[in-house]
Amino acid sequence: MDNINERYSRQMLFSGIGNEGQLKLAEASILIVGMGALGTAIANHLVRAGIGRVRIVDRDYVEMSNLQRQMLYDEEDVRDHLPKAEAAKYKLEKINSTIQIESIVADVNPTNVMELLDDIDVVLDGTDNFQTRFLMNDACFKLGIPFAYGGVVGATGLTSLFIPGETACLSCLIGSNASSGATCDTVGVISPVVDIVASMQCVEVLKYLTGNHGSLRHALLSIDVWHNRQHQVSITKPKATCPTCQKGEFNHLNKSTDEATMMCGRETVQINRGMPFELDEWSERLTPLATEVKKTPFLIRVQLHEGERLVLFPDGRVLVQGTEEISRAKSLFSRYIGN
């Protein structure tokens, strides 16, 4: 208890948390999906706050363009081609060695989302696409787990804490097929709005986990930090026709996992092989066929003669980088990976 009093002393002095709230945080388990800009800021706040168990999931690896806004990474992570989940875990354990941090390098999809939510108290959104967000929204409302949504692009952000049985859900407010088409990779993003939205997500989660439910916002917050605008929309009344929180249909959980999906704005197509890769074996197999092959304990990066690049992960995923055409990506996958 002495170590807790020292580490969290300023947080425990805050009347909304105190000793009792700090103990509740130590007993809590959270899942952060996506360890990009939002995910790293969220993890930094909540690991420092003393959440007892933190599970982080991300499918990608650290690139130079991430460093402008993804606070847990540095140039060494880029040079080492580290998966974001592994790089984040390493940094977070240096910040707080007293809690349990679990990292998973994977694509969140209908085949694994329910397992990832096992024994979790709150799910936090650090993703960059609505396909995954609506999947998590469905899973959370099916299991009765609060979902802390957040999204940023340019200088604008959206965030809300959706609580099954108490509030509307993401599908109610936005519609399950909604997408503005704008992403950080197409219109950019400034780092301060990331920190603001992540902080708003975290403070609602801290309220919820410490039992301060009367202080919850119960609204979708929209902010534009460049033009100094802020707006709130109440989430206390679910839409009667909502397929998720009212009808319990959970359509996104029932969708088949796509073999090939485009990663928006990145000239990258992800293809799921359906079986694991043995990295040593595939490094040897691909070396004679490519201009450059680099293997790490977590992935293989293959520079092709055609100009594109393949990134192979042990779980069977392949990123085909340098194209947005699924047909082209599948052709290269077939040529170099086969079945």
Image: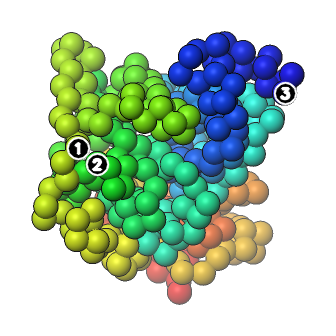
Q: Nearer the viewer, residue 4 or 79?
A: 4
- Give the amino acid at mark 1: Thr
Residue for point 51% across, 69% down = 114
Query: Label 1 belongs to which residue?
Result: 236
Between 268 and 60, which is closer to the camera in this rendering?
Answer: 60
Q: Are marks 3 and 2 in contact (CB under 8 Å)?
A: no
Indicate whether 288 appears above or below 28: below
Q: Earlier in the sequence, mark 1 or mark 2?
A: 2
For the N terminus, the quadrant is top right
Q: Is residue 54 visible?
A: no
Q: Amino acid at mark 3?
A: Met
Gap in Å between the C-alphas at discs 1 and 2? 5 Å
The residue pinned by badge 3 equals 1
Which of the 4 image quarters holds residue 3? Answer: top right
Question: Mark 3, residues whose alpha carbon is within 10 Å: few (<14), some, or many (≥20)?
Answer: few
Count the labels in the image: 3
Which numbered dot is residue 167? 2
